[in-house]
Each structure stands twice: as structure tokens, then as C-alpha cells.
Image: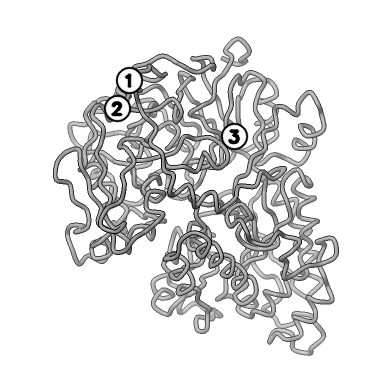
Amino acid sequence: MRNKKTIGFAALVTALMLIAAACGGDDETTGGKGASTSGGQKGGIYRVGYQEPFGFTDSFDPSGEYLGSAFGIYSNLLIRGLVGYNHVEGAPGNVIVSDLADVPEPTDGGTTYTFHIKKGTMFGPPLSRQITSDDALYAMERIANPKTAAQYGFYYHGIIEGMQDYVDGKAKTISGIETPDDSTITFHLTEPTGDFLYRMAMPAAAPIPREIGECFEDAGQYGRYVWSSGPYMIDGQQDTDTSSCDKIKPFSGFNPNKEMILVRNPDYDASTDSPEARENLPDEFHFLLNSNAKDIYDKIANNEYEDDVASEPPQTLRKYSTDASLRPLLKQNSGDRTWYINFDLTQPPFDDIHVRKAVNFVMDKEGIQRAWGGPVVGDIATHIAPPEVTAGHPTGDEYDPYASPNSAGDVDKAMAEMKQSKYDTDGDGLCDAPVCKDVLHFTRNYDPWTAAEPVEEQSLEKIGITLQERELADFYTPWQTMNKTSPIASGAGWGKDYADALSFTGTLFDSASILPTGNTNVPLVGLTKELAVKGEIADLPGRVIDGIPSVDSDIDACGKLLDQERIDCWIALDKKLMEEVVPWVPYLWANNNTVIAEDVSQWEFDQFSGYSAWAHVAVDQSKQEGL
């Protein structure tokens, strides 16, 4: 997502075999019980301007939350998994390391993993108790509980023995998970799974105190009560009355409509962790909701915010990329992310593959890139998975099935494709059926998405399609709800969940990802009548349920392979999706641009979350304003 720093996928697959444990040792590190060993300055408040509401995709409940920025808060600061990452950029940032437990070696032919939780790893006050194997088991039970809306539960359901039966209500326990004592948890898998440790490093798999979590087992409820196992906690947790469920109140430091305030967790013992993973230098983190992107960057320029989770306006990117004095404050890193326009394959006119191909041919991707701010924001995308996720995939120049002059769209090829559509009634290359007019289009209600709208509209008008725009402050909720989403949408991007293409292609296009709410397979590739009924779309007027293509068998086949065969399989599936399914118009392999303030004395990028590595940042308090 920048001047591209390409990470070879072969190296990432190799990293699976080079999983390294980061030792705790006796050196004191910054946290509840230590002092800094890094060159960064300890202390101060690190403030982050946050553009979107803290509702996220599951109200900040780690069992179901599915946004990278939330992953960053969890894994850098708030909660610890059995294993995790060092929160650095590039290939080293994709290597699994020790966290609450050391990294285990699989046994039984790769089907058994046993974790031993370190002594001295604690939940924060007022629980102030040792984390146990039962807490890790409870996190897995929440993943398998449909009420807690684990959006990426498919990573676990069919892999851990007995978990699917638990999901389906056929069993009261997960037979494939054993907890023989308080510090040991063993997972028995249905088959060897080379990326299992990556899955265990996801936030949903991090231990949750059962006595707190069981009080909040409806979707999203636990988001106001996320209990710390990391170096920081949400302010107010320490004052919570845990004597009964009805006495537990939302933490004072988290107002989803205003802010999230994190303070140090006094029960965090840095000797159980690693300074390579977490340095924990600021005393507090303030994530401050501010829907005005210009104001966010004005505050960063004035040292009133240190960092951002926001979409940089094009003028901001131009300013920081062209001014030599500001250029060091613009951080560009590979976020392994594709921005795209998606179709719902059940909604006309996009149930017709010829219409979908025509849109790919006609779309002015260069114009969209320009609306976003020019080449500084990233490279024009020509297929689904970004090159960093599948090294060896032909580059955009070598593989572009919808190539056009200067990436500005090819009207002739688009019209030739449209002539083959049932929605071109007179064969003139234009979509002229009634369903081609005023097609509902979801996007976000701020730049760069609003800036790109005219480009998208003008492109589609060239093949007879007009749009009815709906600009949304909360884009994800309706977009991911099967019976509320639009026929076409352009507000979404996807970054890898972890360093394997399964977490990209599999997550987005497997029918197992189709959910009534929190749906990640928004095009509904592989939709069945049963899934359509569950999503309450089977009887909606105009929906086309039959004949939706599936790539489930392709995903299953690729997932069982290793090394170069696995890479080649994902490459072939990417091509199949682009040419035989056509669920998207991928338009940008985006740089991850972050603007930091001059008072930031240390900064790092977290390759896992795709955002700032808050575990490693530091601030010069003498330069801070507004405190």
C-alpha cells in the first residue's frame, strides 16, 4: 500500500516453518511491572484521531470483531493470545512468536497442538488472577456460539474436532479441545493444517475470563467490557464491581460515540512478554472519535494528535509527499490490501456475468486512483489478491484480463461484452432493461469514496447503467447484511487476516463465509437455496438464487497443499475468480499511509493489523500540545 515493498509469499509460507518463540527473560520492560529497555521515551499520552465510529463490525467484541484497526488495538495493547506477533513491518512481522504460551511443535502428524500457559500471565484488576486453560477454552466456545457472531469462525469450525457439532447444537462440549490442567490446553485437528498457529493468533482466540464473558453472550455486548490481559486496559475496568453480572457496568473509558481511553494494566508482568513484541512506552492511549478528516490532520500538524486511523484527504497526501520537510512524517507501508467494487450476484443486472465483465472493462481505474490522491495512494489493481499475498502471481502488467488504455477503461470491449447480456435487449452494447436504471449503490459518505463517485457513475453510464447513490456513515452494517445490501458497492477493501492467501480468497468467496449479518462473502459466491433462506433473501422480489457459481472445491483443494503447489493453486483460483466468476472490480492495491506528528519520537508499522504498531510507539512529551 505505498511505494511497494513487496513481501514474497514464498517467504511467508517459509515463515510457517520458522515460527520463533520470543523469550521473556529477566530484563525489565515497560508495563505494569517494568522499565523500558528501548531507545524510545517512556511516558506521555499517545492520541489517535479515529474517523469512523467505534461500533466497528461487532461493537468491539473480539469474538466477532473483524476490522484491522480493532485487531491492532487488541493485539498491541489490550489482549494477549496464546501466540502472537512482534508487531513490526514486512516479513518479520508475519512470523508467529510466543505470547501467553510458547510456540508449540505439532504432533500426531500435524494434527495436535498443545499450549502451556506461562505462570504470571494475569487478567487485570479487579480480577487480578492467573489466566487459565479454561479461559482459552471459553474463547473457543464463544467463537462457536452463533449468538456471539464470530465472523471468522469458519477458520476453526471444521478444523478442530467436534467444533462443528458444538456449533450445530449437537454437542455440549468441543471434543477436540482438552484442558487437563489449569495451564495446559490441547487442540486435536481433523487434518493437518499448516496455518493453524496463524489462526490461533487471531484476536477471537485470545483467552477471555469466563466469569465476565458469560455475562455478555449476545452479539457485540462484550465490546463494552473487554477484559485486559495485555499491558493496557480500558480505563474504568479497575473500578468494576464483578460480584454479579448485573453489577458490571460499561467501563468509563469507553464511549463508542466519543473515545476509548487505555491506561496501564498494573497486573501485566513484562517478564512474561517480550520487548520485541511490546515495549509499552506511553502511559496512556487515547483513541478519539473525529469524523472530520481535515480536523484530524490539522490536529496532527499541531501536535494535538500523534497518529491517525483515517482516510487521508488527497490534498493531505499531496502536501506530505511533496514537502521535503513533511515527507518524514508520512509513513507508507504494505498493507496487503485490495480496494474494490463488488457486485451482489443475486441482484440484477449483476446476476449476468456479461454485465459484470462489461463493468470491469469500462471502469476508469486511473480516474479512481486520481480521485483518491494519485499514485501515492497505491497501484492500480488488476486482479483480486495483492501481489504481496501470492508472490509469483503475474504482476498487474502481465496479468490483467480487463486491460485498457492507461487503465482508463475500454468502452469498445465493454460494449462488446454487454451485447452478450440478457439486459441488452437490442444488441447495441448498452444495458437498456429497466433494472439497469437507478441501480442502488452503497459507498461511504466521505472522501476519497465520495470523490470517486463521479468517476464510477460516468464509467457505468457509457454502458447504459445509472446509479442511485447512497452514501453511508455506517457502511459495513448494511453492506454485510444479506437482505439489506445493494446490487453494487464501492466502499470496501480487504486486507489479509494472516500471511496465507486462504485468509484472503477463502474468507471472501467460500460459501461458509456467507452469513445473514456480518457477511464477508458479500457477492454470495457459492450461494445455496438454504443459505438464501437463512439470509432472508430467497423470497425477495427480483433476486436470482439459482445458478450462482461456487469455488468451494477450489478453496478446499488449495488449502490442503503446501509450499509452491499451494501458491500456484491460489494463483489459478485468482484467475478463475476474475474470468469465470467476476465478483469484483478490483481497482487499487492501496498503500497504508499514516501521518504522524512531530512529537512522535518512535514509530513502527504492524504488518499483522496493517496499522501503526502501538506496541512500539513513543512520544516526546515536551512537544505535545493540548495536554
Q: Residue at x 34, y 57 (%)?
A: 156
Say which of marks 1 and 3 sits in front: 1
- Please report whichever mark, 1 or 3, sits nearer to the chain's N-terminal start: 1
The amino acid sitting under disc 3 is Asn
Residue drawn at x 46%, y 31% as measured from the top left: 260
Q: Is residue 480 above or below residue 63?
A: below
Question: Vertically, is 163 above or below 593?
Answer: below
Residue 426 position in % (x across, y down):
79, 90
| Quadrant holding the C terminus | top right
Q: Position of residue 65 (x, y in %)?
A: 43, 48
**In contact (CB < 8 Å): disc 3 and disc 2:** no
Left or right of residue 360: residue 73: left
Q: List the residue tagged with mark 2.
A: 124
User: Residue, x 59% and y 39% (percent of image)?
Assistant: 51
User: Quick one: 94 or 529, which is closer to the camera?
Assistant: 94
Q: Based on the displayed image, in which of its 4 quarters is residue 392 positioned?
A: bottom right
Pick whichever, 603 or 240, lies toward us.
603
Instruction: Work out how far the residue at label 1 is from the one at label 3, CA to CA, in angstroms.
Output: 30 Å
Which amino acid does the dot numbered 2 rest on? Gly
Image coords of residue 136 (percent x, y): 26, 44
| Left or right: residue 97 compared with residue 180 | right
Q: Secondary structure at mark 3?
A: loop
Pointer 1 local density, CA inside 10 Å: few below 14, some 14–19, many at least 20: some
Type of the residue with mark 1: Pro
User: Which label was assigned to residue 290?
Assistant: 3
Label placed on residue 359: none
Q: Is residue 349 left or right of residue 221?
A: right
Look at the image and name its color scheme: one colour
Evaluate if marks 2 and 1 touch, with contact meaning CB atoms under 8 Å apart: yes
Observer-side mark, 3 or 2, equals 2
Image spot of residue 579 (x, y percent): 65, 74
Q: Which residue is mark 1?
A: 266
